[in-house]
Image (cartoon, helix red, strand yellow):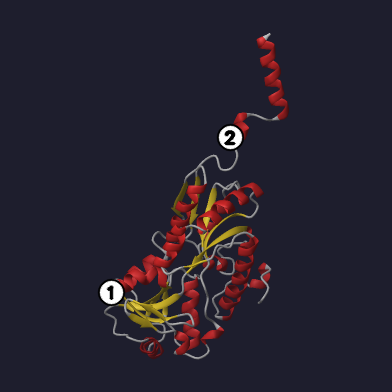
Amino acid sequence: MKFQFGKIITAAILATGVSTGAQAQDYPFRDITTAVVWGAGGGTDSINRMIMAEMEKHLPVSINVINQTGGVAGSNGMVYVQNQPDDGYTLVGLSESNVTAAVQGGWDQRFDYWYPFIVGGSPDLISVPADSPYNTLEELVDAAKAAPNTIPAAASGAGSIHHLNLLAIQNGADAEFLFIPYGGSAPGQEAAIAGEVALVVTSLAEQAALIEGGQLKPLAMLTPDDVEIAGMTVPSAFGIYDGLDQYLPLKQAIGFAVHNSASDDVKETLGAAFEAAIASDVVAEWAAANNYDVGGQYGEEAQAIFSTLEANFAYTLQDLGSATVDPMSLGIEKP
């Protein structure tokens, strides 16, 4: 009799598809991997490692962060995650700079392929090595005008926000630097410190420790406001050259994303963990200590922000002669 009863229960489970094993498969039931498209030690890498550690506190699994660098505007990392299942177990760590991958021929998708989460960002500035002969932005620009395309400049990879800011300064100040691409902000800053390049354009968050440590000398902020750091005032480039507001400021939006085709359950689970992390004192204190502004947008709100960035960046690159694909051919409308 017991044997027959067991067979009846087994048959009922198979018929309904309900089992304790199936219930255990609720997302997430295994560790998540976040593949950051930029190099270790840079802003996107650092902010992803911080937010993932905080989100882990609100999930039953760990989140492992790796780096998948290279390609055009982070395209290698995006393609890597694109080729993974859309089950929410592989996220992509990215930034606003990735919206330019398509117009530069490195990726064949609009950015709305992703369902993004924005942690925040930090303003860009131009700095030179501590022993540089240039003490002001004007001195640096005058040298570039006197010898066009000879003064080497680091600004992460081609199409990154730092590269776009370098192009904007060149256009606004009528000077031309020799752009040297690097696989992320950290390698570019190291190149400046080593004297491989004469200047570097990255964010205040990324440069702060190097400025405070006397390894980099800041010349100008690429935003409308001056900034106080290490006992000095870093002037805004807007007050030095007229017309920069046609090209600047171009601001960061750093975070991560999951496939937009992921299930609602995946999006809601990640969203809940993200909201809890963003609201924590840990994130607020980290942002204040590292010169970041906290965002906190995700889903449709973040997609709208990235859509605007995609259009602005795409046509900025086209206007500056650095786009290889017509944005209109990708369905990107001119802002």
Point out residue 29 in the picture as x, y percentages from the top left corner: 55, 39
Q: Is mark 2 on a helix, strand or loop?
A: loop
Residue at numbered disc 2: 24
Between 129 and 158, the one nearer to me in the picture: 129
> Compared to 142, does 188 lie above or below?
above
Where on the picture, by quarter, is residue 45?
A: bottom left
Point out residue 140 in the picture as x, y percentages from the top left corner: 37, 86
Residue at numbered disc 1: 214
**Residue ID at (34%, 75%):** 197
Give the mark nearer the N terminus: 2 vs 1. 2
**Residue ID at (66%, 70%):** 332
Where on the picture, by quarter, is residue 260?
A: bottom right
**Residue ID at (71%, 21%):** 11
Q: Can you see residue 110?
A: no
Q: In this view, does 31 lie to the left or right of 142?
A: right
Give me the C-alpha separation between circle 2 and circle 1: 53 Å
> Compared to 12, does 140 lie above or below?
below
Point out residue 319 in the picture as x, y percentages from the top left corner: 58, 81
Mark 1 is surrounded, within 10 Å at the Cα level, by few (under 14), some (14 to 19) or many (20 or more) other residues, namely few
